[in-house]
Amino acid sequence: EKPRFEETLSCETSPDHDLTIRVRGASVDLPAGRAMAIVIDDLTQKVRFERQINAYAERLTVAIEAGHVGTWDWDLRTNRVEWSPWHYRIFGLSHDQFEGTAESFYRSVHPDDRGIVSAHIVESRTTRSPYRATHRIVRPDGAVRWVEAQGRFLFSDSGEPIRMSGAVVDI
């Protein structure tokens, strides 16, 4: 087995700048004998970007929790729908009660509002415009609630809709 190593190092180069590098090395056999090959990768931008993403995600989580906002993501290829914890709370459902499909979402929409919700979704999809709908839901305990939902479709490079993501609030 040839010796190998990998180490990630960080240092502060000034009060407002850090440097992060990854050093990898391995023993290699050459015609003249054994040598050590070393590769140094500058990870500074990657680490900085990851920190920014984490800070953004933290702020977004605080805003969602403070605003009691439910979020959803609908994968059109698989028809799978994922809800955030607040979405479940707004709809009064547990994970076991929601099947994770568009059809199971529609079952929670008030029967008189299903056509309007469907029409807004179709309009958003065909015109590539934001989705916005104010409608009623019926919770499992029979309580009727008004919600406002906003979202948008995401399209593949070929122009096919592949996902719809958005947010919902109890109004």
Image: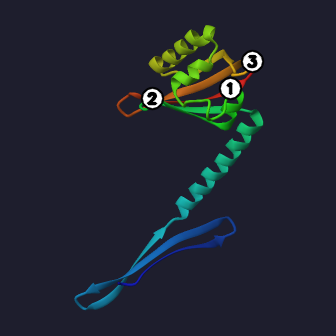
- For label 2, the SS is loop
Q: Is residue 137 above or below residue 165?
A: above
| Residue 20 occupies quadrant | bottom right
Q: Residue furthest top?
A: 112
Give residue 7's mark: none
Q: Is residue 143 above or below residue 92?
A: above
Mark sitting earlier along the chain (1/2): 2
In terms of depth relative to the viewer, which is nearer, 108 or 11? 108
Residue 124 image point, x, y percent: 51, 19
Residue 95 image point, x, y percent: 62, 35
Please tell me which residue is depicted at 63% across the width and 66% down the height of the picture: 17
Please tell me which residue is depicted at 54% across the width and 60% down the height of the picture: 45
Query: Which residue was labeled with disc 1?
Result: 91
- For label 1, the SS is helix
Q: Is residue 167 above or below residue 109?
A: below
Looking at numbered disc 2 in the image, what kind of residue is underneath it? Leu
Query: Which residue was labeled with disc 3?
Result: 143
Give residue 76's mark: 2
Report crowding for label 3: few under 14, some 14 to 19, many 20 or more residues within 10 A (C-alpha).
Answer: few
In terms of depth relative to the viewer, which is nearer, 29 or 43? 29
Residue 145 image point, x, y percent: 73, 18
Mark sitting earlier along the chain (1/3): 1
Q: Is residue 35 above or below residue 152?
A: below
In terms of depth relative to the viewer, which is nearer, 4 or 30? 4
Contact flag, marks 1 and 2 (Cβ < 8 Å): no
Mark sitting earlier along the chain (3/2): 2
In terms of depth relative to the viewer, which is nearer, 25 or 75? 75
Looking at numbered disc 1 in the image, what kind of residue is underneath it? Phe
Left or right of residue 112, residue 29 in this image: left
